[in-house]
Amino acid sequence: MFGASREAVNAEAARLLDKLTHVGWTRAECTLLAPLTLRIRTLAAEKNAVILAHSYQTPDIQFGIADHRGDSLGLSEVARDTPADVIVFCGVRFMAETAKVLSPRKTVLHPVPDAGCSLSESITGADVRRLRSEHPDAGFVCYVNTSADVKAECDAVCTSATTLAVVEGVPQDEVVFLPDRFMAENLKPLTRKRIVAYDGRCIVHETFRGDTARAWREAHPDAKMLVHTESSPEVVAQADLAGGTGDMIRYVRNSDAKRFMLVTECGLSDRLRVEFPDREFIGTCSLCPHMKRLEMRAVLQALEAPTPEQVVDVPADVAVRARRAIDRMFELTSKQADATRPHSSPGERA
């Protein structure tokens, strides 16, 4: 299949099995997948393309073809910094748009162009303009899970990890936080600023309930519960850590615990089962139907002959303003890091 030799297929199957065995894949399944992953990886090299996969993607995407795994903004920074000419973004649409905003001269491909996001689709640029007329003195901070059009209408972007720093960093006392209501509610006790929330919700994280989280805790008292801040305050209250996917990965990496409950999308649990095979991840996750729409053959097709819809385009004026809001986040979080960094003697690293 795809002209690969038996020796090459066997070697590729062994590479796949080394990773995917930790999430239940068999040698036979890896052997069936191997010609396809070989073809995609070969084609990507020929086209000087880099393949980026969000941590919510399926394990075959993350470990079969991806050059980098991570969260949406981190991957977009990889896209910005890579010498590759082509970026294949395995995620949802707003992520590919963010990559394009940060890499305007590169070709960004999104293999499943109608794979959306409930948060991103809950708000438009027109909605932000309307809210600005209602709150003319407020600062506007939008979560990274938004379209480029929405980012372009805001003062600063934030990630789950930088939410508080960005909100504290904008000069206004009133901040309209868009679009995740639960993230806004989780933010309110942490700041003296007046937070105006919108009513966007993640269809994955809104399914988790406080009583369910308490029951999980009672059933697994020795496990650490890691909760995404897109979840309700009642769920976040049960957490050993509340944060984003990057926070969860760092927590697992640095923790002495052996059992974890990841209250987020199941792709992250699969990723960590592969990367930390000595840890146990209890089934407390939920699936995102949008993330799971992408599959291997769509990536191959986009590399071979992308359709116009698969080539991501952001109007230049929108891209410039969205980039400004993203850069504002980097500026504000850098200032906070500088303010909190210990003083050091010459030659020392803080």
Image: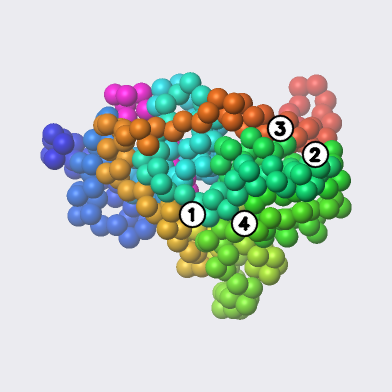
Few, some or many residues within 10 Å of mark 3 (<14, 14–19, 20+): some
Mark toward the start of the polypeptide (1 vs 3) = 1
Label 1 sits on a secondary structure element that is: helix
Where residue 307 sits in the image (x, y, percent)? 32, 34
Label 2 sits on a secondary structure element that is: loop
Query: Quick one: 146 or 221, which is closer to the camera?
Result: 146
**Mark 4: which amino acid?**
Gly
Dividing the picture into quadrants, the one containing residue 157 is: top right
Residue 328, labelled with which disc? 3
Say which residue appears at 51% left-offset and 31% top-offset: 314
**Mark 3: which amino acid?**
Arg
Measured Cα–Cα span from mark 3 to mark 4? 23 Å
**Mark 1: which amino acid?**
Leu
Q: Which residue is mark 4?
A: 200
Q: Which quadrant holds the N terminus? A: top left
- Look at the picture and state if 130 lies above or below 337: below
Mark toward the start of the polypeptide (1 vs 2) = 2
How is colour applied across the structure in the image?
rainbow
Nearer the observer: mark 4 or 2; the answer is 4
Measured Cα–Cα span from mark 1 to mark 4? 22 Å
Mark toward the start of the polypeptide (3 vs 4) = 4
Q: For the magenta stretch, what is the residue range?
A: 44-56
Where residue 254 sits in the image (x, y, percent)? 61, 50
Label 3 sits on a secondary structure element that is: helix
Q: Which residue is mark 1?
A: 268
Residue 258, labelled with which disc? none
Few, some or many residues within 10 Å of mark 2 (<14, 14–19, 20+): some
Mark toward the start of the polypeptide (3 vs 2) = 2
**Mark 2: which amino acid?**
Val
